Image (cartoon, rainbow, N blue to C red):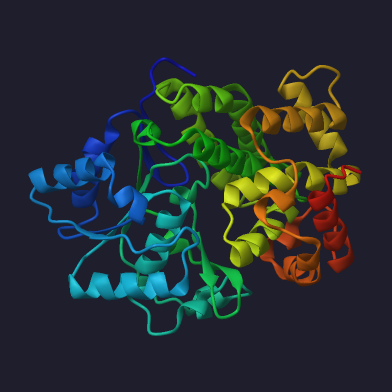
Amino acid sequence: MSANLQASWNYPTPVHFGPGRIRELPDACKELGMGNPLLVTDPGIAQLPILEAALEANQLANIPTGVFSDVQANPNGQNVEQGVAAYRAGQHDGVIAFGGGSGIDAAKAIALMVGQDRPLWDFEDVGSNWKRVNAKGVAPIIGVPTTSGTGSEVGRASVILDEAAGVKRIIFHPTMLPSRVICDPELTVGLPAHITAAVGMDALSHNLEAICAPGNHPMADGIAAEGIRLVSEFLVRAVRYPDDIEARSAMMSASLMGATAFQKGLGAMHSMAHVIGAQLHAHHGLINAVVMPYVLCANRTAVAEKLTRLSRYLDLPDPSFMAFLDWVLALRNELGIPHTLDALGVQPEHIADFAPAAVLDPSTGTNPLPFGAAEFSDLFSNAIDGSLT
């Protein structure tokens, strides 16, 4: 990456990128007419100095800012309802989505729901449900990521756990895309190594499943390929040297790129991750990292040519599907990612429930090959046993 790490661009929304740019939070609030925003985050980040710095910047600019941090690692419908209640009680006029994917997803759903008179699940990303939204009622949103994985700050949807049904649902509307994004890689410096690794592999999974998804979308493919290159060059560095701002910046870029590219589609990695996360509450990025090679092998006939081209772009020896697979396996090993799903609590007895649930996940529709319950049963079994076939 260039030594000049600061930039601003408008793709897919205005993004202010670079070290120290969290100081521009008050300007973003003013641009969107926020005089009394609600900052939504998770309990862990609520205790960190990075949050204090953001609140202090707004305070110095005479912008009182409330905080709602009752958000679980896998945000659920109750978290959203409580956030909406806090927004209304504080008479807030906008939402600052501050955190990793969980905090940002919850914040975006809260911003959506403050102006709706229908239940949250009515806006699940199925068919034309999004047309039910009262778009004028959606609160303005500023996205401030503190991890480099989900890229939710440049997405138009939130993944929210429906605890009653035991499934994760995707809530979608175009107005959920934050109107301003502040990407300050200095906010990620304090992430523990294992979290940096897991969220970095999540960014890889987004870019990788986007490039493997069927259909003609050259822009998404180009973005995804460069996102994967950034992961290959900088993820291990960011894990080993947490104060390396260049590496942190590159991974934040890769995260943005993955979330921009996967408008083309995702696939079975995310189908499996959503099901496992909903039931066992394992870390989403870590699940994607574990299942990645098994899904690639299952899709081999449909993705071999794409991964051969990608391995050339990464300058891997003897470019081929196997060269790319070996690179993924080596990266996982270097980062300490478990090789099998049993390390995350997945057992053979789970397969009977998990496989049919994965078939119904929205990500399955853009998997490179059509997968039914039998294919997912084999996938879960292989990922538990460590069988790469």
Q: Nearer the viewer, residue 295 or 319?
A: 295
The total number of labels drawn is 0
Horizontally, is 177 left or right of 213 in the view? left
Q: Does any portion of residue 179 appear in the rendered image?
A: no
User: Residue 360's image quarter?
Assistant: bottom right
Residue 230 at what x, y percent from top left? 58, 27
Residue beneath the point at 51% across and 32% down = 251
| In the image, residue 269 above or below residue 7 | below
Residue beneath the point at 74% across and 61% down = 364
User: Residue 65's image quarter?
Assistant: bottom left
Residue 160 at what x, y percent from top left? 51, 67
Residue 10 at what x, y percent from top left? 41, 41
Horizontally, is 63 left or right of 5 in the view? left
Horizontally, is 329 left or right of 137 in the view? right
Q: In the picture, which quadrant includes the C terminus?
A: top right
Q: Does any portion of residue 85 appear in the rendered image?
A: yes
Residue beneath the point at 71% across and 22% down = 314
Residue 44 at what x, y percent from top left? 35, 50
Residue beneath the point at 7% across and 50% down = 62
Horizontally, is 67 left or right of 125 in the view? left
